[in-house]
Amino acid sequence: MELLQLLVEDIEPRLELIKVAIAASKFQQLIQEAHHIKGASANIGATTMSLAADKLEQLAYKQERRGTSELIAEIEEVFKQIKSFVRGCL
């Protein structure tokens, strides 16, 4: 449970950083943030989030913005579910 709480606290600001990075075409920052989310979500077994973050990271390597909105929406949906679960258990 503690790991999930840490994940929620860590991921929330990173999602905002990702949105800013995409808007400003800061692909290196996008790579770093997506990579972090990919690893953190894989560590807790959030496979859907991890796979979406991996795809986002790959798009950033190609400096491609097309498709990022859908991936962010997917990551945010899983994040909301995790956040809701954590809040319900506290």
Image: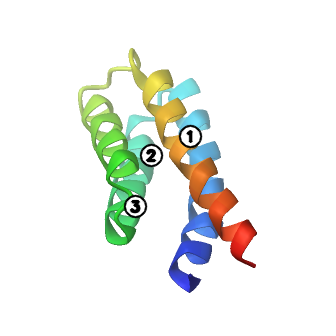
- Horizontal side of 73 relative to 67 (left or right) equals right
Q: Tag 3: residue type?
A: Ser
| Quadrant occupied by the C terminus | bottom right
Marker disc for residue 41: 3
Is residue 69 visible to the viewer in this orientation of the structure?
A: yes
| N-terminal label among 2 and 1 | 2
- Mark 1 neighbour class, 10 Å CA radius: few under 14, some 14 to 19, many 20 or more: some
**Percent of width and height locating residue 31:** 35, 45
Question: Could you tell me how far apart the alpha carbons at marks 2 and 1 are, in whole angstroms?
Answer: 22 Å
Residue type at the position of mark 2: Gln
SS of the residue under disc 2: helix
Where residue 29 is drawn, which disc sits there?
2
Crowd around label 3: few <14 · some 14–19 · many ≥20 (10 Å): many
- Where residue 21 appears, x then y in whole percent? 53, 36
The structure's colour scheme is rainbow
Residue most extreme to the bottom: 2
Q: Are marks 2 and 1 in contact (CB under 8 Å)?
A: no
Between marks 3 and 1 in the image, the one whose residue lies nearer the viewer = 1
**Amino acid type, residue under disc 1 in the picture:** Glu
Q: Distance between the Cα atoms at labels 3 and 1?
A: 13 Å
For residue 77, the mark is 1
> Which is more N-terminal, label 2 or label 3?
2
Label 3 sits on a secondary structure element that is helix
The front one of 12 and 5 is: 5
Q: Mark 2, residues whose alpha carbon is within 10 Å: few (<14), some, or many (≥20)?
A: some
